[in-house]
Amino acid sequence: MPHKKQTKLIADVMVGKLARYLRMAGYDVAYINDADDDLIIQIAKKQGRVVLTRDTMMLERREFKNGILRSVFIMDDSLKDQLLQVKDELELILEPNLILCPVCNNLLEDVEKKSVKNKVPLYVYETRDDFKYCSRCGRYYWRGSHYDYIKEYFRRLNDNLKRG
């Protein structure tokens, strides 16, 4: 069985926040906020992606009915419940993994600390040593308080599963 991180996904416009959090866990999630059903299906077929959607009409299409494409119908509005559902149905591992840009899904590159001087807040530059860069959207990342928040969020999510 392939490693779960190799699961490739595509999210429709109704589950953009879910896409972002799955990216924070290291999953390749395509998301185009103005993509119509035809484009989502085309990308899913071409790239072998599982479709994450809240659109019941899309799931009536023959690609889903005939089992050509795999999908997860997201049942809840709550991000927490969406993550728990996807984790369960696709057997995903949810833990922070800073390898993909949460904004654009591009692979992050390690960069030397000296190269980020004047590109990140001074306090961050002085207190952190490891930085990542997204060459597609130009953002810098580091393991700071936001990373700690995501780590705690995923920990609580996983603890919730064990209890429940």
Image (cartoon, rainbow, N blue to C red):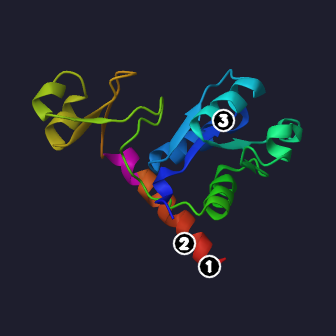
Residue lying at the far bottom in this picture: please name it: 163
The chief SS type of the magenta part is helix
Residue 58 sits inside the magenta stretch: no
> Which residue is label 2 attached to?
159
For mark 2, does the 10 Å Cα neighbourhood hold few (<14), some (14 to 19), or many (20 or more) residues?
few
Q: Where residue 150 sits: x, y (%)?
A: 45, 52
Residue 145 sits inside the magenta stretch: yes
Amino acid type, callout 3:
Lys
Q: Where residue 55 sits: x, y (%)?
A: 82, 38
Amino acid type, callout 1:
Arg
Helix, strand or loop under label 3: helix
Q: In this view, does 62 lie above or below 71?
A: above
> Which residue is label 3 attached to?
45
Q: Distance between the residues labelled 1 and 2?
A: 6 Å
Q: In which quarter of the image is residue 12?
A: top right
Range of magenta residues: 144-148
Q: Are marks 1 and 3 in contact (CB under 8 Å)?
A: no
Sequence-earlier tag: 2 or 3? 3
> Which residue is label 1 attached to?
163
